[in-house]
Amino acid sequence: MTQAFPIKFEVEATAGEARAGRLITRRGVIETPVFMPVGTAGTVKGIRFEELESDDLDAKIILGNTYHLWLRPGIEVIKSAGGLHRFIGWDRALLTDSGGFQVWSLGALRKISEEGTEFRSHVDGSLRFLSPEVSMEVQAALGSDIVMVFDECAPGEASHEETERSMNLTARWAQRSKTAFDRMQSEDADTGRRDAEGLSGSQALFGIIQGAGHLDLRRISAEKTVNIGFDGYAIGGLSVGEEKSVMFEVIEDIAPRMPKNAPRYLMGVGTPTDLVEAVARGVDMFDCVLPTRNGRTGQAFTSCGKLNIKNARWINDQRPLDESCRCSVCRRHSRAYLRHLYIAGEMLASILLTHHNLAFFLDTMRGVRQSIRSGDFPKFRREFTERLDANGE
Ligand SMILES: [Zn+2]
């Protein structure tokens, strides 16, 4: 076996705090800043893997959700298939979340203790228990290339005291996650490597900084997380109900405190403008359900702001969704046709809108990377946000 390395990360150009670089995983090189489409239950909803791999989208990494896959189809099924990559038919990089956020969003259905979180499965109502150790075990079985620690997320409006308790619990769970992760690696539990030929390295583990909108707690959380030592670092618990200004304040303060030589991942954010603004504050990686979820409800993201395809004004509009988009949907179809599909309840409406939305998010990040490398990022950022603001994104 060759020497196992989890990931390598190189920053190759900067513009202020913004960074353009390369994240080298055992399943390919990912140019950063990068947007990662969310594949909750082993599928990026509404789009085939061939399309994700096509030149149109060329997504280099997607997400899988530990919580959903653990409950259904269950770990034994995925292990039998030889890991999540083989099970779903995707050879590029995969990041799995820890299940912490999904369990947190169950609200009253969960019970948190020092040991972990007890909750009722939304699939069959059975009582389940998720902990740092269980989450690491499940993510090893999934064989994802990037694993996230098991954390707890405090609500955006949580008090200082409540957030502090939660942040300290997250720090203890981070240490337990790391210990369990290292044990899984040494026991060769990583299905993704064991069953694949020629992979260069092991799974990588990312820590998560919590602390809601309280900067002092965010700083302590950053310090504790960095002290444990991870391959990459995430900012979690944003975009959960707090004001946008609070989110940017946290990113601006915390990103520079994260190690320069490791990737920085902002979890679950956000709109195209949020992405560009977070890049400007030093973030390298993003995931969000917006392009896929909104695609299914008839909303398109365009370079001129959001467009609701249900609107009667598009009934005879022969223009593409976005006149400056070169995706296959915009090259072929009109707003009039897409509106017709949506109104008629045709599944192709969701498929086409999802495709365009993902193309727009991935293209935006391509533009961000190019402009950081060419020194034009401030201009790109100004023009991008001004155009969207003017149209009320
Ligand atoms: Zn398009």
Image: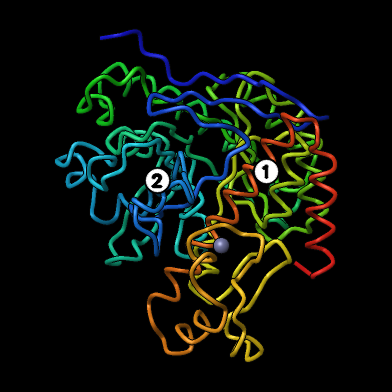
Is residue 310 or residue 172 the one in the foreground?
Answer: 310
Residue at 73% of width from left, 54% of height from top?
273
Question: Is disc 2 surrounded by few (<14), some (14 to 19) or many (20+) residues within 10 Å?
Answer: some
Q: Mark 1 — residue?
A: 367
The answer to whether residue 28 is visible is yes
Rendered location of residue 71, percent (x, y):
29, 55
SS for dot 2: helix
Locate the C terminus by quadrant: bottom right
Based on the displayed image, in which of its 4 quarters is residue 232 positioned?
Answer: top right
Query: Looking at the rendering, in which quadrant would you find the N terminus?
Result: top left
Three-letter code, disc 2? Glu
Name the residue type under label 1: Gly
**On screen, 293 above or below 132?**
below
Image: 138 above or below 303: above
Q: How far apart are the alpha carbons under marks 1 and 2?
A: 19 Å
Residue found 26% across the figure and 19% down from its top: 198
Q: Residue at x 42, y 68 (%)?
A: 351
From the top left corner, tell me how far across and down residue 376 is, in percent.
80, 36
Determine whether, in the image, residue 233 is placed left or right of residue 156: left
Nearest the camera: 256 or 341? 341
| Residue receiving disc 2 | 53
How far from the left and from the top, in percent, is residue 364? 65, 49
Q: Is residue 380 left or right of residue 95?
A: right
Q: Residue furthest left?
A: 80
Neighbour tally class for label 1: few under 14, some 14-19, many 20 plus, Cα within 10 Å: some
**In contact (CB < 8 Å): disc 1 and disc 2:** no
Along the horizontal axis of the image, is 244 left or right of 186? right
Quadrant position of ligand 1: bottom right
Q: Which of 69 and 334 is in front in this view?
A: 334
